[in-house]
Each structure stands twice: as C-alpha cells, then as structure tokens.
Image: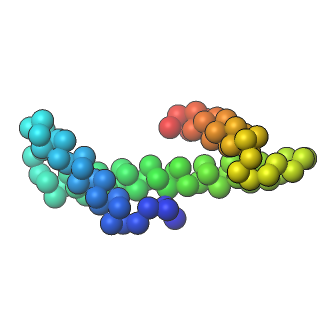
Amino acid sequence: MSRLSDARITALARLTLRVLASQGRLRSERAALAESKRVLATHFQIDDRIDALVRRKIASLSRRVVPGSTEWNVLYRRYFEEERRKRKF
C-alpha cells in the first residue's frame, strides 16, 4: 500500500499534465491523467516494497542498529539504492 493517498497521486499526475499541455504534447487529458496516475501509483508501490525489504534487512543484522542513527540512515540509503539497481528502477 502506497503511503501517498489517491488524492496526492492525482495532484502529482495533474502537475505532470500541466507540463505536457504547456509543451503541446497532450492529446487526451482523461487518458493521460489515468496513465499518469497508474505509472505514479506503480512507482510508489515499488518504492514501498523496497522500503519494507530494506528495513527488514537492517533489522536482521547481527548487531542492533538504532533507527534514526547516522549508521542506520547510511545503511538504509545504501541498501535502498542497491535494491533499486537490482530492479533496474
């Protein structure tokens, strides 16, 4: 489940549509909005899955790493980017 609400995703999709419209690249606003929302929702769902995986990975380390600590943040960023690269995302 994405941490962003449907309303937030719609707002982001509408911002995307404004850019496309200003460049004259928008043919069907309804179709473009639906596709933009679908792409954004998919993107955020993948990020949420990666986030959960990374948090489990950090929690499974043999030593305890305190959430919010500098070490935890460094590990989180490193593992998150590794997982995104694995998925070519």
Residue at left offset 17%, top offset 47%: 18
Circle count: 0
Q: Can residue 35 be seen in this snapshot?
A: no
Residue at left offset 35%, top offset 59%: 9
Rendered view: 55 above or below 76: below
User: Toward which corner of the image does residue 25 lie, by quadrant?
Assistant: top left
Between residue 13 and residue 34, name the one nearer to us: 13
Q: Position of residue 4 (x, y in %)?
A: 44, 61
Which colour scheme appears in the figure? Answer: rainbow
Seen from this angle, which residue lies furthest front? 69
User: Toward which corner of the image does residue 37 lie, by quadrant?
Assistant: bottom left
Q: Position of residue 73 (x, y in %)?
A: 68, 43
Q: In this rendering, would 43 be left or right of 26? A: right
Residue at left offset 46%, top offset 53%: 44
Between residue 33 and residue 8, name the one nearer to us: 8
Q: In this rendering, would 59 be left or right of 78? A: right
Residue at left offset 33%, top offset 66%: 7
Q: In this rendering, would 61 be left or right of 71? A: right
Q: In this rendering, would 6 be left or right of 60? A: left
User: Toward which corner of the image does residue 72 lie, by quadrant?
Assistant: top right
Rendered view: 56 above or below 88: below
Q: Position of residue 24 (x, y in %)?
A: 9, 38
Q: Can residue 48 be seen in this snapshot?
A: yes
Q: Position of residue 5 (x, y in %)?
A: 41, 66
